[in-house]
């Protein structure tokens, strides 16, 4: 080998050896560096009392078919000589017996007991209560958790065997539309229930959208306090044991217990208040511009929309609502609300319904009774209160009034329906089927009325002003009754108007007319249109016969208090054979006086002569401008162009008195008959061709005799000439005239009267 080649080979070998040595040294140094770094970053050596440390520990509990809960800790430390481990960053997830929940409890550290499996967490604990479905939806989308309720507390003990967590410390919790606090809690993972032991307070963010005076975005909080709370996540209920009180700015609810039902999104759906074991019946107190009102019942239920407004309310058992001007009682009450408005839409009351109202300015009261009542309320713009538009009884109903004067009125029917004005004041009530009314005035008998239907008009104070009755109207007051097709009852003045074949009756009389008007306070009655009255008693103003007294006219004015009856317009009265007609006939019951005025015409029987073969009376026709009959005197006075005549005689005078006597049977039986007539002032007597004049003329029926006196009595006879004397007497039956000349001589002259 040449020297040059050897030298070159030796140099390459030395270089290779150097490179290999460098690589070896680098690897050594790198290992030293890694070891140094690992040593620096390695955890400290466990204390001498630590037996073992683990990371990522997880254990579960189940029933063989489902895992009910899982406990996970990021780190577990076991200590020598102790039956306990320290768990850090603990997460307990409860799935429930059916696996339909996803409740999570988180805390920093807990002490785990190996013997009984209990976990004691002394620090802060956060619970997130959520259904499995909501948890799955939450994991698939961004945004806040769906349907989650959270609980914050401390000092929690978790029992591994039962899955129960409990604490005696203060508790805070939140859920959709609410939050609250309490002291002491027990969480049962298998049942998904959380119970707060005492001093419970909840704030509910009830929607104030579209409440009067509220903006749509506002929330009106409701503070709820109770002794204890049971929260069931699976049933989505909050049960508060009482005494319970729920307060807002305008309302206050007190009850023995309160249950809140949530929807799937954990928004308030239903609220139920009941007496509970404390036997405190629920009562709601509301404050408004009119004052405080209360609503009480054995059970109160409210349903809410997802947006937070009330949709329906129901009160059950001994329902009573009191306000400054009204009281309402029923067995049940159901209220439907207008959507978004939180204002009443429809109220249904059932079972012994009674509604009492009173006028604030007077002592007048009104009472409505029925077994079922329905009230409809108006729809109003946001910011205003709804008012009643229509109300009706769905079964038999009764309304009673007592006005400020103490007068009592009553209306009942198979159905009552009322319409209300814009201010919520009743304007009219429509009564249908078997309508009955009652009115009671002080010092007067009760007035009752019935009809097929009726309409009642209301005044501003809530009292009735007018009642219109239709179909088969029947009225009764004391011993007086009436029938008509239609009737109108007016409250002030107390008046009743009957129309359509109207007839009024009492124990002894009846009156028919097209229209009758009764004024209750004065006792006055007015009738018009084909008036006809019949009096069967002997107590009318005049008794001309033993039969019923009949009267007819176009109009009648009568007064039951004074006993006066005035028949006007073609007035006619007849009783037995006696007939009287005039423009008006007035009967005065108490004084037994009859007054006929204007175009008086009458027919009266004359008492037969003592020696007459026939006892049949002769009829006298009378006419005058005025007639007054005094029943106690059996005398009728005729005035103004008086004419009385029979078949054979006629007598004229300025004034004439007819004297009557009762027929056979005494005063109470038989017709009144003319037994004497006395004329005064220009008396003229006519009999066939004979005519007599005098100042006074007297006729007696018993002996059929005329006696003329005063004013130069004169008899004119076409065949016998003229006879004059101080007094002239002539007998019709014997055609005899006796002339008293006045000079002491009596001259008797007989004539055969031309008949």
Image (cartoon, rainbow, N blue to C red):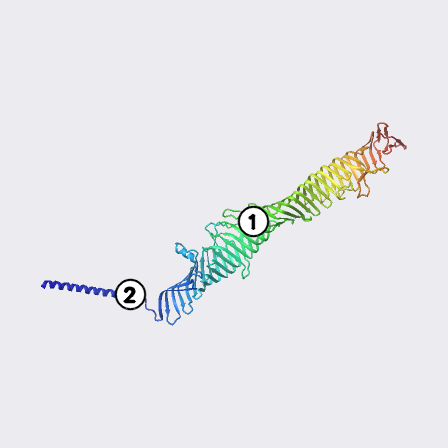
Residue furthest out toward the left: 2
Residue furthest out toward the right: 745
Occupied quadrant, residue 609: top right
Q: Quadrant of the N terminus?
A: bottom left
Q: Quadrant of the C terminus?
A: top right
How many numbered marks does the figure carry? 2
Q: Which residue is mark 2?
A: 38
On screen, residue 495 versus residue 419, left or right, reads right
Counting from the top left corner in percent of width and height, residue 51 is at 35, 70
Residue located 34% across and 71% down the image: 48
Counting from the top left corner in percent of width and height, residue 605 is at 80, 37
Secondary structure beneath label 2: helix
Task: Report the disc number at residue 375.
Answer: 1
Q: Is residue 364 visible?
A: no
Occupied quadrant, residue 31: bottom left
Q: Is residue 36 visible?
A: yes
Viewer-side residue, 70 vs 706: 70
- Height in image: 627 above or below 85? above
On screen, residue 670 versus residue 378, left or right, reads right
Counting from the top left corner in percent of width and height, residue 714 is at 84, 30
Counting from the top left corner in percent of width and height, residue 85 is at 39, 68
Residue furthest out toward the bottom: 81
């Amino acid at each position: 080998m040449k020297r040059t080649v050897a030298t070159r080979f030796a140099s390459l070998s030395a270089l290779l050896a150097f490179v290999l040595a460098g690589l070896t040294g680098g690897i050594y140094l790198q290992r030293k560096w890694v070891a140094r770094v690992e040593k620096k970053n390695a955890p400290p050596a466990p204390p001498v009392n630590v037996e073992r440390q683990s990371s990522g520990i997880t254990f579960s509990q189940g029933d063989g078919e489902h895992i009910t809960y899982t406990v996970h800790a990021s780190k577990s430390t076991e200590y020598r000589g102790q039956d306990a481990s320290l768990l850090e960053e603990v997460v307990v997830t409860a799935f429930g017996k059916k696996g339909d929940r996803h409740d999570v409890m988180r805390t920093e550290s807990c002490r785990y007991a190996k013997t009984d499996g209990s976990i004691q967490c002394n620090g802060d604990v956060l619970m997130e209560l959520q259904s499995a479905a909501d948890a799955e939806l939450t994991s698939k989308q961004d945004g806040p958790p769906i349907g989650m309720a959270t609980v914050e507390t401390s000092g929690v003990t978790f029992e591994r065997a039962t899955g129960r967590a409990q604490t005696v410390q203060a508790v805070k919790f939140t859920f959709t539309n609410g939050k609250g606090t309490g002291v002491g809690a027990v969480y049962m993972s298998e049942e998904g229930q959380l119970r707060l032991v005492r001093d419970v307070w909840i704030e509910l963010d009830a929607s104030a959208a579209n409440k009067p005076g509220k903006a749509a975005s506002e929330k009106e909080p409701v503070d709820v306090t109770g002794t204890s709370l049971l929260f069931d996540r699976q049933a989505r209920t909050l049960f508060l044991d009482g005494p319970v009180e729920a307060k807002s700015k305008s309302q206050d609810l007190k009850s023995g217990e309160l249950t809140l039902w949530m929807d799937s999104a954990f928004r308030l759906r239903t609220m139920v208040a009941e007496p509970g074991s404390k036997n405190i019946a629920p009562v709601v107190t509301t404050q408004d511009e009119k004052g405080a009102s209360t609503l009480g019942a054995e059970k109160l239920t409210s349903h809410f929309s997802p947006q937070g407004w009330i949709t329906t309310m129901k009160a059950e058992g001994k329902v009573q609502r009191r306000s400054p001007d009204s009281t309402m009682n029923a067995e049940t009450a159901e209220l439907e609300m207008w959507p978004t408005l939180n204002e009443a839409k429809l109220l249904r009351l059932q079972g012994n319904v009674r509604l009492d109202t009173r006028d604030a300015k007077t002592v007048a009261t009104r009472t409505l009774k029925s077994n079922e009542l329905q009230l409809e309320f108006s729809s109003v713009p946001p910011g205003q209160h709804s008012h009643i538009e229509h109300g009706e009884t769905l079964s038999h109903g009764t309304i009673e009034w007592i006005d400020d004067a103490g007068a009592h009125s009553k209306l009942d029917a198979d159905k009552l329906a009322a319409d209300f004005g814009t201010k919520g004041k009743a304007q009219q009530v429509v009564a249908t089927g078997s309508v009955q009314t009652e009115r009671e005035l002080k010092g007067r008998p009760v007035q009752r009325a019935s009809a097929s239907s009726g309409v009642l008009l209301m005044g501003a104070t809530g009292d009735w002003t007018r009642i219109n009755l239709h179909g088969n109207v029947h009225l009764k007051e004391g011993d007086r009754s009436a029938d008509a097709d239609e009737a109108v009852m007016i409250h002030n003045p107390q008046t009743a108007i009957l129309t359509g074949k109207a007839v009024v009756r009492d124990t002894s009389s009846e009156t028919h007319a097209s229209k009758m008007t009764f004024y209750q306070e004065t006792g006055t009655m007015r009738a018009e249109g084909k008036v006809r009255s019949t009096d069967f008693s002997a107590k009318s103003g005049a008794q001309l016969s033993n039969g019923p007294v009949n009267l007819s006219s176009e109009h009648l004015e009568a007064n039951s208090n004074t006993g006066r009856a005035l028949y006007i317009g073609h007035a006619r009265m007849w009783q037995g054979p006696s007939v009287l007609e005039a423009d008006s006939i007035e009967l005065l019951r108490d004084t037994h006086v009859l007054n006929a005025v204007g175009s008086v015409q009458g027919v009266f029987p004359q008492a037969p002569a003592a020696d007459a073969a026939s006892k049949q009376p002769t009829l006298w026709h009378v006419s005058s401008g005025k007639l007054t009959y005094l029943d106690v005197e059996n005398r009728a006075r005729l005035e103004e162009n008086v004419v009385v005549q029979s078949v054979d005689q006629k007598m004229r005078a300025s004034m004439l008195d007819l004297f009557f006597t009762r027929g056979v049977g005494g005063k109470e039986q038989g017709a009144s008959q003319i037994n004497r007539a006395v004329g005064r002032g220009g008396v003229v007597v006519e009999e066939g061709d004979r005519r007599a004049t005098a100042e006074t003329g007297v006729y007696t029926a018993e002996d059929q005799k005329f006696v003329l006196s005063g004013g130069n009595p004169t008899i004119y006879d076409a065949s016998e000439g003229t006879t004059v004397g101080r007094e002239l007497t002539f007998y019709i039956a014997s055609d005899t005239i006796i002339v008293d000349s006045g000079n002491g001589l009596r001259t008797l002259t007989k004539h055969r009267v031309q008949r």
